[in-house]
Image (cartoon, grey):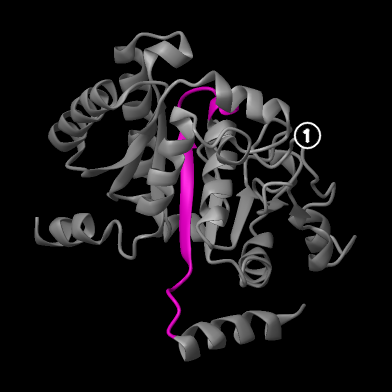
Amino acid sequence: MNYYRFDQAEGLRQMLGAPQQQVYTFWSAGRQSNKNHILRNLAASLVYSGRSVILLDATCSPDGAGFDQAQPHSELTLVDVMNNKTGPEEVYGRTYMGFDIVRLADSPAEIVGRKAFKNRLDALLETVVADADIVMVDARLERKDDFVLSMAGSSEMVLVVESSKNSGRDTSSSILGAYALMKRLAARFGRIPFGVLVSGSDEAQSRTIFGNMEQMASEKMAVQLHFMGHVPHDDDMVRAAGLGRSVIDAFPMAHSAYAFRRIAGAFTEAGVFAQTVYEMAGA
């Protein structure tokens, strides 16, 4: 295993005064397909802003963000490396959008309950994501809330919430679904702040959805939320996906393209969650 690669990358960051690697774990109580659109376009937007990005698909599912027939991706997974079927260099898939995709496993059965994997997997992940400025983890809780990636517990947590216009559900159902997911995550990781990214609505409606979520999280869980932005409903984003491209590349004047550029700016700000964490410490 090439630990030198990790040490060299971290050493260069320190020498050049480069920002520390940022890790964001994305969760959703809505449709996985919607989260996939959000993650891929956000990753592409971050690449456009000059960041190197790895999208780590930890859903262990063929419908995760890392498995897209329209994009180049490796058929090999990190579990294949753990089982000595391939080397770490073979798990990367460079997309047409400019970011790398790495998949954790083909199914939850390959990792759930295998505690012996944990330390080895943590070390492997350090190597695989070492050169990325930003790591975006596509995560999903299974029935028993099993989740093996240690990096999730120390990453920034982001909830993708669909509005009623986009999901076909009423807004209260979307909020309640997000709240139920937050409770499960808090039980798994303890009290932590969450970023909230709302999709499928304009800014006014998104702010209303966030405000309702914020009040519920504060009163019932003593958890603070941070608004990360919104992505309006936009047919151009779907059209771009059909072309295997990001919306900011295919349709740069689309409303969603503007939204993703704004959100990418928020995600690249150093310490985007710092104030929330500070306030929690003093609570």
Does 274 sit above or below residue 131?
above
- Image coordinates of residue 243 in percent, x first then y, are 73, 30
The residue that label 1 is drawn on is: 70
Q: Nearer the viewer, residue 257 or 28?
A: 257
Task: Rate crowding at label 1 as few (under 14), some (14 to 19) or many (20 or more) other CA atoms within 10 Å.
Answer: few
Q: Is residue 162 visible?
A: yes
Magenta span contains residue 56? no
Magenta span contains residue 23? yes
For residue 62, side relative to residue 40 (left or right): right
The residue tagged with tag 1: helix, strand or loop? loop
Does 234 sit above or below residue 186?
above
Q: State the quadrant of the C terminus.
A: bottom left
- Image coordinates of residue 71 in percent, x first then y, are 77, 40
For residue 48, side relative to residue 233 (left or right): right
For residue 32, side relative to residue 197 (left or right): right
Q: State the quadrant of the N terminus.
A: bottom right
> What residue is at 70 percent from the left and 35 percent from the top?
61
Callout 1 amino acid: Ala
Magenta-tinted stretch: 17-34
Which quadrant of the figure has residue 39? top right
> What residue is at 66 percent from the left and 63 percent from the top?
121
- Image coordinates of residue 19 in percent, x first then y, are 42, 74
Outermost right residue: 85
Which quadrant of the figure has residue 140? top right
> What residue is at 49 percent from the left and 91 percent from the top?
15
For residue 160, side relative to residue 6 (left or right): left
